[in-house]
Image (cartoon, grey):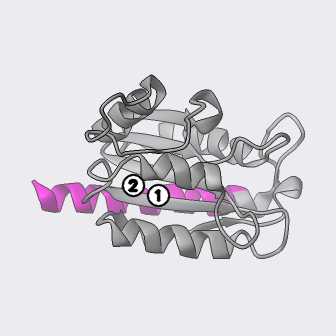
């Protein structure tokens, strides 16, 4: 199975990239996945979406590149911080470029916050959005609360609570993805 991990923040000083990088390593160690690719929105510089992929007469090259990767992935994990009780506008903009790329695809959501709630509001809103467009949202959740305590400045994961929770999330998401893909064959 091919997994794409999307880091949904471009903010300066963001901590969600540490979570995304750690999850790449965690999923690479899981035998269920043949390949794991990090999609960092900071690398794409997407303009404001005017029309979806497949309908836009002159789709920006970055949007086509991201779309091709999303389309070829068997599953998607989105890592999102919580901004103002929701997920970031840059993530919403990026996700809106696509529709068919998510349909009937297993999606895992990881929410990140500096507070104690772990981005649960961002997680809820992103879950609703993905369910609305026909993706299969994993019931397994990973809330990364107090993210600054879970990682060192260089991005090394050190929080024991996070390490256990992320390993459990990866195992459960691998099972969920295998079940969805197996049922659709």
In the image, 15 versus 55, the foreground residue is: 55
Residue behind mark 1: 171
Residue 173 is a magenta residue? yes
Q: SS of the residue at dot 1?
A: helix
Query: In the rendering, at what x and y percent does residue 155 appear?
Result: 80, 38
The residue positioned 65% from the left and 33% from the top of the image is 42
Q: Nearer the viewer, residue 41 or 147?
A: 41
Q: Residues within 10 Å of mark 1 (few under 14, many from 20)?
A: some
Q: Seen from this angle, which residue lies furthest top?
A: 61
Is residue 53 a member of the stretch shown in magenta? no
User: Viewed as shown, does residue 36 lie left or right of 153?
Assistant: left
Name the chief secondary structure element in magenta. Answer: helix
User: Residue 61 or 83: which is nearer the viewer?
Assistant: 61
Which of the two residues, 175 or 16, is positioned nearer the viewer here?
16
**Whole-percent x, y for residue 132 in the image:** 35, 72
Question: What percent of the width, then of the height, locates residue 13?
Answer: 85, 41
Mark 2, residue position: 174
Residue 36, by quadrant, is: top left
Can I make out residue 58 in this image? yes
For the question of whether residue 29 can be seen, the reply is: no
Q: Is residue 77 above or below residue 39?
A: below
Q: Where does the image place residue 106, in percent across and percent down from the top left? A: 34, 58
Determine the secondary structure under disc 2: helix
Q: Are marks 1 and 2 in contact (CB under 8 Å)?
A: yes
Question: Which residue: 70% across, 55% down?
Answer: 163
Q: Which residues are magenta?
A: 163-185
Residue at horizontal 37 percent and vertical 33 percent from the top: 69
Locate residue 142: give its quadrant.
bottom right
Viewed as shown, does residue 107 lie left or right of 142?
left
Q: Is residue 11 left or right of residue 178?
A: right
């Amino acid at each position: 199975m091919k997994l794409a991990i999307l880091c949904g923040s471009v903010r300066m000083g963001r901590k969600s990239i540490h979570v995304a990088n750690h999850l790449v390593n965690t999923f690479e160690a899981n035998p269920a996945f043949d390949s794991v690719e990090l999609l960092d929105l900071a690398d794409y510089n997407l303009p404001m979406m005017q029309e979806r992929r497949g309908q836009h007469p002159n789709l920006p090259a970055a949007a086509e590149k991201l779309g091709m990767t999303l389309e070829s992935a068997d599953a998607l994990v989105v890592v999102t911080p919580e901004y103002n009780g929701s997920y970031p506008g840059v993530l919403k903009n990026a996700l809106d470029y696509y529709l068919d790329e998510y349909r009937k695809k297993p999606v895992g959501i990881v929410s990140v916050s500096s507070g104690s709630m772990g981005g649960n509001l961002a997680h809820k809103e992103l879950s609703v959005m993905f369910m609305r467009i026909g993706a299969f949202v994993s019931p397994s959740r990973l809330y990364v609360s107090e993210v600054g305590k879970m990682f060192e400045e260089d991005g090394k994961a050190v929080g024991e609570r996070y390490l256990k929770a992320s390993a459990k999330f990866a195992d459960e998401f691998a099972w969920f993805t295998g079940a969805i893909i197996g049922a659709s064959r």
